[in-house]
Image: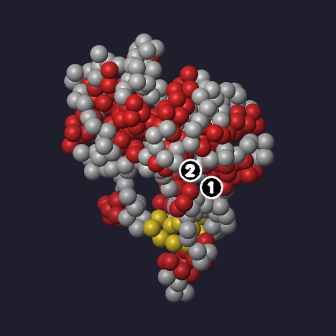
Amino acid sequence: MITAFALNRIYTEYYRAQGYPFDISSSTSYDQAFVEGRDIFANISKLVEEQYNDYIVRRGHVEPMFSSYCNGTTATCRGLSQWGSYYLANQGYTPYRILQYYYGNDVDLVFNAPEGNVRASYPGRLLRRGSAGEEVRTVQKMLRRISQSFPAVPAPTVNTGVFNAATDAAVKGFQRTFGLMVDGIVGDETWSRMVAIYNSVKRLNELDSEGVSTGEAGTLYAANLRQGDIGNDVRAVQYYLDFVAQFYGSIPRVVADGIFGSATESAVKAFQQTFGLTVDGIMGRGTFNTLLNAYNQLYNSLSAGAAQNIYPDYAFSAGNTGAKVRQIQTWLSALAQRVSGLPAVTVDGVFGPGTQSAVMAFQRYAQQPISGDVGILTWNALLERYTQYFGAPVAAYDNAFS
């Protein structure tokens, strides 16, 4: 019960969402007192080590339950009464039955939960129009729920992890509603306020919490990639690594096959060594952010001609305009002449409904996730298919470094 209370504070980032640089306090008014270096009984220490990853949840929820409690004499509360549980035990109540008495019949127990390092949920990089990934999807999920309680915040219309026009409008609506700078960029301050408001509307720090379901907590992209992983997120990382490797002789090139094998692990370790990171072969948040920064710097250093057919590291979606959109449309229009089922598209530099439909048709043909957005995987698949039918376009990926 005490473990669940503490883990709820950490899971919901109760303090970090308020701007504090810690996850749990040392005050009996709010949490549990901790005195550095204080002597404790050995048997208590052993029990804590054995039980700290066992906790209680509401049935159907994933977050550790906010299990408030008090002594039941000098202080009373809606949760468990410590002295009350003593009397219930004397009446023959089992520990689980006591929990049900105070917290309801839908309380469940979690045993031996996986362990991991505690870290702030803020991804450590600015999220804005064109950003993509699990962090963007998290923003969309939070904003969709917040908009139900605050209608001034428009709900994003999709939940695919691409920071599109609807997400931009929702972020600006959130910033406007809660007195933040209205720039449509999710930095540390906007992220923290969003987490705090999301926790508040879902009452995650209350006994009557709305809870976080398994579906809500599910992810599309892994937080850490390592040897043995497979999928589109691995393939995207391999594209970034291979691009950077062409500028750094210390990093071996990799094939973007979506399989995190020994070759990819070696490339990750070489990248980490080259950029002064912990060399563990794992593509975690810190390594990925460094990889994106390196990719962007190298991309921006290329001439306009050399960079023409290289993915610029921001996704394209409905509402985008410009030369890159025109290029996508050119590829789509050309492929429509050779591939049955791909619709023709007007090459006007405007990512409208027609372009979105054509992108979705191509993604279906290329057996990619059907989102209607053009991220790194769709971009490179378009380029590969175009090259197969028409030959490498001017300044294509393979000759941009010659």
Q: Relative to 99, does residue 325 appear above or below in the rendering?
A: above
Q: Residues within 10 Å of mark 2 (few under 14, many from 20)?
A: many
Give the side of residue 146 with respect to residue 393, left or right.
Answer: right
Of helix, strand and loop, which one carries label 1?
loop
Residue 223 point in image, percent of width and height: 42, 45
Q: Quadrant of residue 290?
A: top left
Query: Does dot 2 land on a helix, a strand or a loop?
Result: loop
Q: Callout 2, which amino acid? A: Thr
How many badges with numbers are in the image? 2
Q: Residue at x 52, y 29 (%)?
A: 330
Q: Earlier in the sequence, mark 2 or mark 1?
A: 2
* Tag 1 residue: 205
Q: Pick the quarter of the image with the C terminus.
A: top left
316 over 6 or under it: above or below = above
Q: Which mark is residue 12?
A: 2
For the point 29% across and 46% down, the residue is 259
Q: Position of residue 199 (x, y in %)?
A: 63, 50
Q: Amino acid at mark 1?
A: Asn
Say if 83 sits above or below 113 in the image.
below
Report crowding for label 1: few under 14, some 14 to 19, many 20 or more residues within 10 A (C-alpha).
many
Residue 359 seen in the current view: yes
Q: Is residue 84 visible?
A: no
Camera-side residue: 326 or 73?
A: 326
Q: CA separation, marks 2 and 1? A: 8 Å
The image quadrant that residue 71 belongs to is: bottom right
x then y, percent, for residue 262: 21, 43
Picture layout, residue 137 above or below residue 183: below
Q: Are marks 2 and 1 in contact (CB under 8 Å)?
A: yes
User: Which dot marks residue 236?
Assistant: none
| Frontmost residue, 188 versus 135 | 135
Is residue 95 rendered to the left or right of residue 115? right
